[in-house]
Amino acid sequence: MIALTFATPLLLAGLAAAAIPFIIHLLSHVRAKQVRFPTLRFLRASMARTARRRRIQHWLLLILRAMLLAILAIAVAEPISRAAGDWLADGNVAAVVVLDNSYSMAATPDGASRFERARGEAGGFLSGDDRPALAAVLSTAGGFGGGEPTDRLERLREEISGARIRYGPARLADRVADAVSMLDGAAPARKDIYVFSDLQRSGFEELLELRDLTESEDINLFVISPDEPVRNVGISDLEISGRRIVDSPVTFTATLVNSSATDEVVEVSFRVDGRAAGPRVRRTLRAAGQTGSRTTVRFHHTFRQPGPASGAVVIETPDDLDVDNIRRFALRVADRSQAVVVGGGATESRRLDAVAMPRLALDPFEDRAVPWPVRSRTVTAEAFDERTLDGADAVYFCEVARFSEPQARATERFVRQGGTAVFFLGPETDVDNYNQRFMQEVPEAGGLLPGRLGGAVGEIGPDAPAVGLDWVDVDHPYFRGLYENVSDYLSVLVQRRFGVAPSPRGGRTLMRLATGEPLLIEKPFGRGKVLLCTTGSSTRWSKLPTHPVFLPMLVRTAIEARTDTGRVENYLAGSRVSIRPETAVSDDTGPITLTPPNGQTQRVVETTPTAEGLEATFTDTHRPGIYGWQIGTGDEPLDEGVFAVNPYGEGCDLRAFEPDEFIRAMRARGFERVYVAGTRAEALATAADAAEGRNWWDLLIAAVVLLLVVEAVVANRRGELPGRAPAAPEAARASSP
């Protein structure tokens, strides 16, 4: 909003001169006496039209002369426009200092931290000769500040002096909104918001949309921002894919972001437990904002031992911001999956043995020293009992003919408690036994199986017809990424299979035959799941066991069967961390001892009993790094673990607004009182120039000259010249005595 003032307001009394042309007109307006003159009667119509035109010109001339006198009076009073809300308020000022303490401010483009400079500028403002009467301090990333404006500036200076960098997201727009709310009720004549920041786009783009600020009419916004170019390549994200299980490959994908104005070449390394794990990788990134300014780098690693593990992806090339050159990770590596293969008995041919292919898939190496994520053992159907499932994650029933009541109940409890049971149906399968043991005797969830079994259909033999697949759930973890073309999944051929009548709470079809019948169905039950294959695990009924999809499918079912396939323990700074020991411990084992990244102090975190066991909550996660914890006393704790804390990812993108660009953007949204500079002194000088205002005297004098020209043109068109009375029409002279 712009305020208009006058250097000599008394001279505005001259505006009354604008009425002079109208007064003269009224005083000189004398109606002439009309005398009929027959010989000129033919001119009457023409004179009427001419009179109307002259009347319009007459009023236009009066208005021009009145405007001329009015503008002349305003000009001699010297009008001055300036920003409303006089910021030169003789110390009667309320101010809110918003100090950006996000980690982008830790950049050191000229050898000095931007945050240290901003902290010094903010402290100097509250202790200088022009300090405000009332003030408050807010921080963009938390950790200090808050409260209503106060006149106790010494306390605010102490808060700023003790301010530290935080590594969570910068809530700049929220803090400015808080500042506007604080100043709404302030009494001082001037209200200022000082933002000490780096104009980082990710935060200031949100500020542009802040209606609380753009709709305010009496607040000045000062942004104190350094203008040195920054050179930085940071890691914004680290994605971990694969199963965190012993001897299973895990992929680490890091995203790199270049904030520099030039192309950058960096070297990236991968570390596990503090040691290099593979060669460095070189990447070239284009300048900030260009295609190629972001890229990814992948590392693959296989963990050989179960338990807690940690590491990091590191940019080894130094730049202006160190904190985003490393992205840490922590995870718990699960032990190998334990599988049990239950066979329905060998046939006359090893090739037709129902357990041959599953056993080959799950444990292909007889040498236990060879790395493999699954360990299996095989038992016969007669030897299978509840003890067989001790320590198992998955059980595979390969063409088992029938189940006794104890065997069926042991299988049900195993699945209910989180295990995976896979059923392959074969020639000896007793359909009535399956339906009774797993459907009728298990009323929960509509039965253990996805549906009641029907009779076998299809013929076997060299000349018997075979049915192919028409659909496979290629997005399921069992099949995802095995083949690029869907057609490669569909080349399975089946001659004989069992029908299934799905129950109301049946499962999810993973493989479907071209006839519309399911071949593989998955059903959740309790905390575990059941997989039902309607054909056998031998080659007597189908080509499924020899198809390339079969072996990896079984390995994946075993790995996915583990309920602890390795948790990723990665958190952003400031997050709430829940620590849940996996070892069964009682609530009298004592607290959890936690060691922060610096390793110098230990903190005790009390545990709380929950339905899933003991749990501890830790919230002081503002320092990036690896945190370690353990429960129990002595040299061998009952359980231990690690978790990683990383900075907010997008904070590493240091691209910033240019000062003029941000000012234009704010003014385009209707906010005029914004001043951006590298130091507070420069910002105040800019505000002072704006406060001096604009003297409009010269433009108004030019307008007066223009009106004089226009007035002369209009007067000449009417036949009036200065100092000469207008000529009387012939008809008027003729009518005179």
Image (cartoon, rainbow, N blue to C red):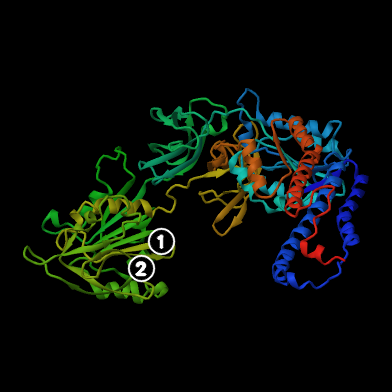
Mark 1 and mark 2 lie on one chain; the one further toward the N terminus is 2
Query: Does residue 169 appear anywhere in the picture?
Result: no
Give the CA distance from mark 1 to mark 2.
13 Å
| Residue in front for this viewpoint, 195 or 513 | 195
Q: Residue furthest top?
A: 111
Query: Does residue 428 appear anywhere in the picture?
Result: yes
Image quadrant where residue 537 sits: bottom left
| Residue in front for this viewpoint, 471 or 375 | 471
Q: Quadrant of the C terminus?
A: bottom right
In this rendering, the label closer to the viewer, 1 or 2: 2
- Specify whether 555 is left or right of 163: left
Residue at 31%, 50% in the rendered image: 481
Label ID, residue 728: none
Residue at 86%, 67% in the rendered image: 31
Residue 169 screen position, x and y as percent: 61, 43
**Which amino acid type is shown beneath numbered disc 2?**
Gly
Residue 422 screen position, x and y as percent: 30, 61
Label ID, residue 528: 1
**Which amino acid type is shown beneath numbered disc 1?**
Gly
Residue 106 screen position, x and y as percent: 63, 31
Residue at 25%, 50% in the rendered image: 361
Residue 528 screen position, x and y as percent: 40, 61
**Residue 513 sits above or below residue 158 on the image:** below
- Specify whether 317 is left or right of 597: left
**Residue 688 sits above or below residue 577 on the image:** above
Residue at 43%, 41% in the rendered image: 306
Label ID, residue 507: 2
Q: Secondary structure at mark 2?
A: loop
